Image (cartoon, rainbow, N blue to C red):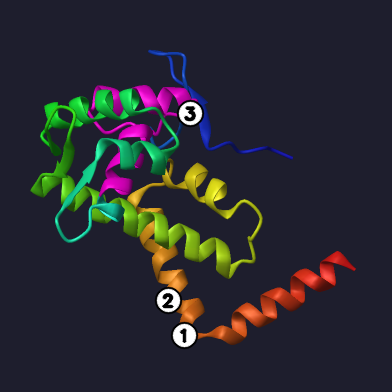
Amino acid sequence: MEIKSEFELTADTGCIAMKNNQQFHTVRGYELLKQEKKQLTSAMEDYLEMIFRNAGDDGYIRINTLAELLNVQASSVTKMAQRLAFLGLVDYKRYGIIKLSESGREIGEFLLKRHNTIETFLRFIGITKNILVETELIEHNISLGTLEVIECLNMFFKDNPDIIERFEDYKRSKDE
C-alpha cells in the first residue's frame, strides 16, 4: 500500500511545505510573520477591542479605567497607548484620555465583532467553562475566512435550533 503525502521537504529552505506551496510554521513563527507585515500584536488587539467596547458616547476612555478593565498597571496602558498613537490608531493625551482614531474605531469594531462571533459559536457548541479564556485563545489566531464561516454557522444554528438540540443529545449519548 502506497502512502500519499500532501507534504514535502523543500530543498531551498528545508521547511516542510504542502505540495501546493503552503509552508508551515510554529505559532511563534506565525507571530513573527505578522510582525514583519506590521500587523497588530494580540495585546494591541486586546487594547483596541477594550477601548472600543468601553469608550462610550464621548468616544474616549481614561488610562486608569482601561488599566482596571484589562487588569494591568496604568504604566502599561500608557506604553501601549503611545504605541497605538504612533500607529495612528488612537489619540493619546499624556496622563489623560485615550480616544480612538477613525481607523482605530474601525479596527476596534471588527475586533469586538470577532470576539462576539467566536464566543457565540462556543456557546452554541456547549462551552461554558472558561468561555472568555477559550475565546481569547481562539480570536488572535483565526483567519478571516474561518471567522466568516463560523459567523455563517452561528446564523445557521440560530435559524435551526433543532440542530443544537440534536447535537446536545448526541453529546449526552457519548458521555453515557
| Marked residue nearer the N-terminal end (3 or 1) | 3
Q: Position of residue 125 (x, y in %)?
A: 61, 66
Magenta highlight on residue 20: no
Question: Residue 9: x percent and y percent?
Answer: 50, 21
Gap in angstroms between the C-alphas marked 3 and 1: 35 Å
What element does badge 3 sit on? helix
Crowdedness near tag 1: few (<14), some (14–19) or many (≥20) residues, C-alpha within 10 Å: few
**Residue 52, relative to residue 123: is it above or below?**
above
Task: Identify the main secondary structure in magenta.
Answer: helix
Instruction: Tell me the tag on residue 155.
Output: 2
| Residue drawn 31% across the image and 36% down it | 64
**CA–CA distance in space, label 1 to label 2:** 6 Å
Range of magenta residues: 22-51
Numbered tag placed on residue 131 in the rendering:
none
- Name the amino acid, label 3: Val
Q: Which residue is mark 3?
A: 27
The residue most toward the right is 176
Q: Earlier in the sequence, mark 3 or mark 2?
A: 3
Amino acid at dot 2: Met
Mark 3 crowd level (few <14, some 14–19, many ≥20, 10 Å Cα): few
Locate the N terminus and report the quarter of the image it occupies.
top right
The structure residue drawn at horizontal position 56% and vertical position 48%, both measured from the top left corner, is: 134
Residue 162, x across and y down, in percent? 61, 86
Residue assigned mark 1 = 159
User: Which of the 4 quarters of the picture holds residue 169?
Assistant: bottom right
